[in-house]
Structure formats: C-alpha cells, structure tokens
Image: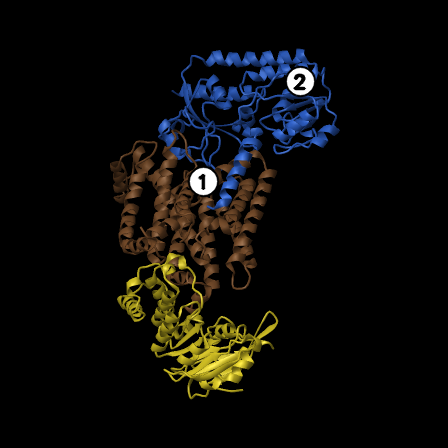
Amino acid sequence: MGFCFSTRLLRLVWHFVFKTLTRVSVVFSVAALAQAEGVASEKTSGAQRIIALSPHSVELLYSIGAGDRIVGTTQFADYPESANDIPRIGGYNAINIERVLELKPDLIVVWASGNPSADLQQMKKLGLPTYESNPKKVDQIAHELIQLGKLTGLEENAKKVASDFLAQLNAARSQHANKAKVRFFYQLWPKPLRGIGPGSWINEIMTICGGENILHSGFSDYPEINVETVLLAKPEVILWPDHHGRETEKVHWEHWPEIPAVKNGHIYELEGDHMHRFTVRILQGMNAVCDVFEKARAAG
Amino acid sequence: MPQFMRAQLALVRQPIIITVLVALVLLSPLLAIAIGTAKISMLDVLSTYGCHLTTACAEPDLTQRIVWELRTPRVLLAFITGAGLALAGALLQTVTRNPLADPYLFGVSNGASFGAVVVISTLGATVGIGMVMGAFIGSAISVTIVMALAGRGVQIERMLLAGVAVAYMFSAATSLVLYSSDPEVTVNYLFWALGSLARAEWNQLPLPFLVVSLGLIVTLAFHRQLRAVLSGEESAQTLGVNVSRLRLGMLFLASLMTATLVAYTGGIGFIGLMIPHVVRRLMGVNNAKTLVATALLGGLFLVWVDVVARTLMENQEMPVGIITAGIGSFFFLAVLYRRRWIDG
Amino acid sequence: MSRIDSDQPVIHVQNLHWYANGKTILQDIDFAIAKGQFVGLIGPNGAGKSSLLRCLYRINRPSEGQVLLNGRDIWRTSLKQNAQEVAVILQENGDYFGIAVTDVVAMGLTPHKSLFSTDTLEDKQRVQRALDQVGLSELADKPFAQLSGGEKQRVMVARAIVQQPSVLLMDEPTNHLDVHYQIEVLQLARSLGITVFASIHDLNLAAAFCDQLLLINQGRLVSCGAPADVLTEANLLTHFRTHAQVDRHPLSGCPRISYDYDTSLLKD
C-alpha cells in the first residue's frame, strides 16, 4: 500500500473522531467532552424559537412539551413522528450557519459529540444563544430535562418528567441489584464483528439489569473482536440492535451450540434507537434488556 | 561489504533461501494456528487434521472446531492474501521498471475502495461477492482510465501521472459517498479500510485462492518475458516480447488480484511494496525463483502479522492494515536511512 | 538510386518511407545486404540513422515500402519469429533492477523458449559459452548495473550470441566507449561471422571494420558501396560539412580520414 494510504487513514481517523456521531454512532464518541454546563450562553427566559442540533435533544424537548417550538434540526431527528416535519439545517458533517441565522433562534441546543466543532465555534463567535447538551451517563438525562425546562420556561413539566425517569431507573436498579449476574455479548455490528466495552453507554444499561459484559477490558469502547473470543467467554445472552431496517449480514451463531446463549436460544434483537439515544426512551430499551436477562435467569 | 559481493552472495544463496522459505511455509501455518485466544497446542492442531483426514470428525470438540472452522480458514486467507498482494506488487514493479510501483500508484486500490464504499452504502454489506464485484469494477475503471491515458506504446511516466490523478479522483468520490451517507456507513467503511482477516470462513476461500493461483501461474508462464522487460521496452521488444500487451495483461492481473483481496480483507497495505524489495535484496535477480519466493514470503509475512493482530490485545482485534502499514513505513525509513536511496 | 547488389540478400529494404508527427524522417530508401556482410550506417547527426535501424528491428512500421528479412516482410512475421532471426544491441542500457550479468545474457534465450519453460543444462552451457566468448565469465554473478560501459556492451554481445540470430543490428554500439572498447566490441561483432548492420559514429572506425557503408543524410540514402567509394572528400564536404583529406591507413590499408581543423573553412 502506497503513500496514499496514510492520507486516507488520516482522513478516516478525522471522520471517525469528528464526524460520525449521531444515531447509532453516538456510541462511538471518543473525545472526552465537557459535560453539559447547564448554563445558556445568553440569558433567555422561555425560548420560543429553538434549533435542536441532535436527535436526542429534539426528543427531550418533545418530552417536556416544547416540541412545537423547534424551528430547525439535523438529519436524523426522526422521533416523535412530528419531528420529521421540522426543517433540516444540517447533518453530522456540516451545519448551515446562514440558515441558522435566518431562523432567528432564541435557543440553539448544540451537541459537541455530533456537530462539527468549527460550526459550533462560529455560532459562539456570532453570539448566538447556545446550550450544550451532551449526556454521557444515564442519570444525566434527568439533568438535561431540567436544564431544558429552565431554558424554555417549562421547568415544572420538566421536573415531573425527570423525576418519573429517575424513579423508574432507580426502581430497575434496586430490582436487579441482587440478582444473579447474566453474562452477555452485545453485538454492535456483525461483519466485522464488533462489541461494546465496559466504558460504553450501552454497558451501563446492561449493568443496571444485572448484566456482566464478556468484554470486561479492552483498548477501545467499541472494539473489533473475533468469534473465538465469544466462544471462549460463553455468554448466556447475545443481543444486537436493529439497524433501522437496513439488511446486515448475519453471524451464524447457530453453528456454535457450545455457547450457552445459542444452546438455550437466548439471542435477541433490540430496537436500536432505544439503546443508542440519550432520551427517556432508554427506559424502554432498559426494560427490554431486563426482560431478556430475566428469561435467561429463569432458564437456569 | 561492497555491494557487488553482496549481490554475488545473493545468487549463491538462492537455493538455500527457497529451501528455508518452503520449510517455513509448511511449518508456519501449524504454529500460527496454535496461537490465539483459546489455549490450543500443536498437538491439538495435528489431532484436528488427523481426524479430518480420516473423516472421524463426526463430533469434534470445541478445540477441534476452533482449529478447523475459525483458525484454519483465517490462516489460509492470510497466506493467500499476503502472497497475492506481494506478487501483484512484484508484477507492477517489473512491468513498469519502477521499484516503488504498487497497486496504489495506479489508482487500483482507490478504485477498489470506491467500489467497496458504494457497496457498503447501498447494500450495507461488508463482505461477499457484492464487495468483490464492487471493488473489481472500481479498480477496472481506474485501470481502464490509466491505460487510455497512457499514450502510444504505454508510456510509464504518463501511466504514473494518470494513476496519481485517478487515485485522487476516486479518493474524492469515496469521500463524497461517505459525506452524503449516514455515520454507520462511514464507521463500517473505516473498519473495512483498516483491514481484517477475522471474517475468514471456509466458503470465502475459493475465489481468492483461484485468483491468486491464476496470478502465480500466469506469472510463471511469462517469467522470461517479465525478466526481458527489465532490459527496457525497446530491448525487450527485440527479444520478441510484446511489451505493451504484456504490460496491459499484467496490470489487469495485478488489479484482479488486488481488487479480490481488498474486497475480502480490506486495506492491507505495504506488502506489495515491501516484500518484493526484501526478496530482491535477499536473492538479487528477477527470475522465476524470485517471483515464487516473493509470493511465499508475502504469505508468510501476513500469516505472522495476523497472529500479532489477534493476540496483541485481550478480547480485541488489532486491524491488520495498521500493523502492515506501520511495519512497512518503518522498514522503508530504515532502508532509506541506511542507503539514502532505494534501488533494486 | 544506388544499390548494393547481391544474389541472396538477408536484409532487403525496398522503397522505404517513414513519417512521424507529420514529418518525413526517411524517404525512398532502397538497399540490400548480403549474407555475412558487415555493413556500416553512417551519416551526420539527425540524418535518420536510428530511425532507419528502428525500421529494421520492427519498432518503426514503414509508412511506405517494406523491409524484407530473408525475403519475408518483417511485419508479416511475429515479434518472436523475428527475434529468433535478428538480435539488436542498443546504444543505451538501462539499470536492469540489479539483475545479474548471467541473467541478462540468459535473456537471449527468450525468443526460443515456450511459456513455463525453465533453463535446461544446454541453455546454461550456452550462456556460459557466450560469456567465455566475450571474456566475462568471471563477472557472471555481478550485477549488470555495476559494470563499465565497455563490459556492458560485451554482455549485450553475449546476449546476442545466445539469441543465435542470423542478423545482428547495432545502434551506435561504440558510443561513450574509450578506444580500446570501441575496437573490442566491433571485433567481437565481426568475429561472430553473421550479417551485421551497425550505425557507427566514428568514420575511421567504420572504414576499418565494414565491408560496405551506407551514407544517409536528411532521411535519404545518398551514397553506398565499399568504404573507399563512400568516404570521399566530396561526400565528407557535402554531407558532413567537413574538409578532410582521405588517404590509406598505413597498417590496414583502409581509407583514413584526416580532418582539417581550420574552423574558418566550416562556414557555409
């Protein structure tokens, strides 16, 4: 491979680090980014024209009742249904700043892991009222809800949604805290085979349900692995997310009855968006995972 | 040691080197198969083959299954891929008489990457016949453009310039596809582009095996013509070699090999550049023996690089393309430092 | 148009014209070379010597006319068949990728071997004999690129010997060589006893080694015949724009040219 390779590699790494972060690839966030500050860069009271530059912030705004105030968003914000009608002003690789200015927003919810950093800097330079929403832990979703509530003047609503969320989360935690651990393998992508490491967002959900990741250590949070590793680790459950209806290749786990999950039929497909988005829908994903683990425990 | 003495030794060494290489080629796979996540001994490996040879493997145990179904196809794919990439590099270097020629220099690999990314973004597939077709069509397009621009008599300088231009063109097209597709595609492309042999399965071996065998057979058939080309275009012509046709044929052969292997294993680089260079240093001249040795050493090299790739980190694969590119670039820096120039 | 007459010409060039990029490089060339003759091609720079040789070794395709080798049009035979009859030694040699001398010589086997064939014992002996013949046996394993210019040309002669041709074409084989090697290379070529057609820069050398000379200028054959008939004071003045005196070489009896170095005479 010649000299072209190094530049291509560089470009790919660049893509990898800066550009790949929405929807499923939320989970690939590698940059350690400052947590949401919880302070709008400009004093606003009850924002009425909001630009939400991430799928999760759109969902969070809808869940506190501010969905109809969103005037612009990015490519993959598709939930709830009505979010599809919001005008798009950019994707993961670029934000159209002129459109942002045209929309005269009084609040822009930005997402450092998913928006191009150059565009964010420019928006800050232009003095636009930005708020950074970038949750990394499940509990932070409640915090995000309350911050957005404050910014939109819907604090009461937000507090209620947030405390409901936390209550369900903690209930699940205590319910599964003392149960037998279930060894699981979460198959992020089939070919090349990739899983999740202990530092990942999805792993936290699994842990709440009493799961024990077979990939307990690793160089990256979303490593490429081989079938042999899974064979030797003998997981009791194998899970994978759907990919928005996209046909993916299958790993033929059925060839390996040596794996308990295969022998006992504990192989499940989960709704990807429930697992990979930082919203209250994570509870649905969590419940699905907890149910699966319960079944595995019941089977023995 | 003066250079000519080294070269004299090289010729004498040839039979010894070939013998050593063949021995390593016979032994390495067994050793390589015994290394990996699961603790498996050479004895287990041998017993697995014993039971498969005697068809007594009705109910193989897990170790035997790992040896037979996971590690054996993987080691074989590594060998085939390494051999094919090294041979493709040697062919291109010979017909262009440029020791730095490799599939990347003619846009072949960029064309293959573009074909692959189109397949990934439209079908979501990262292996299989779709990828091979995509990669091959992409590389065939780039070769066709390069040859069309090569001018009368297929001039090397024009070919190289056209190759660079085509490489950039396809690189831009690849970026465009990535830019306009969703992040999942980008990440999948990235993992594919870093190269991996972890996906090897028995049913994926026939095509790479056939293509690389074809490459080796054609190379051996034309070994005299390939050597004659080294004396220069006109000089080879006076020896009865149709240089333009030979060059065209070998360029297509090298593209076919590269595209097929790239489609199955992704971006595994530097083998086509490094291995022929090492063989020339060890064995001196370019003849049938050297070409066979190039293929063998390329195969061996990738078998062992892949052992490193799968054992370097616990629970994790190291992309094999990162290792080959790393070794390759350090190798060339070392050669340049020692010699301050690269010759044959 | 003058001719070298012969009963059975090995090379017969008939009414040859060659155009390149809209320019006429060679026109109306007509000559024949008899078996076993050593024929020299002379002419001033840019006369078309290399172009003519290229027409003979099947690189330049004649625009008009034809080149017959043993009575057959060379463009109606395959490259390979042609290479079995004609060996060529070029002016310049590439660096050959560090290839060893013996492998360069073995290249001469190429037109005689089929696909996949390896070198037989007989082939190896033939290569060895050719190296002996040019006196380079001791350098057999040395990289070709490291030889001196004279040694390289002798290696190319050895390659030509292995090729077993009936005709040897040489394009300025003595270029860049010192006197010793110039004489040596031409003597070697002569000693092969086959038909040789060579362009030679040095007119005294051409006079000494060639049975016949062809003089071309501006793409036309202007004179041919025995060296004494071609290398006349009039021809030297007309075609080489040089005043000279031609007499007999005291040792060989060949024509000897002594140039007049008074530059004031050169003005047109």
Q: Label 2: few (<14), some or many (≥20) within 10 Å?
A: some
Quadrant location of the N terminus of chain C in the rendered image: bottom right
Say if labels 1 and 2 share a chain.
no
Chain ID for blue: A
- Select label 1 or label 2 by which is in front: 2
* Residue annotated with mark 1: B195
Q: Residues within 10 Å of mark 1 (few under 14, many from 20)?
A: many
Residue A276 in sight: yes
Q: Position of residue C55 (x, y in %)?
A: 50, 74
- Chain C, which colour? yellow
Q: Nearer the viewer, residue B144 or A172?
A: B144
Q: Quadrant of residue B94?
A: bottom left
Q: Which residue is mark 2?
A: A40
Q: Position of residue B88 (x, y in %)?
A: 43, 52
Q: Colour of chain B?
A: brown
Whether residue A214 sits left or right of residue A16 in the image: it is: left
Location of residue B212 in the rendering, given as x and y in whole percent from the top left corner: 40, 52
Is A159 positioned to the left or the right of B30 in the image? Answer: right
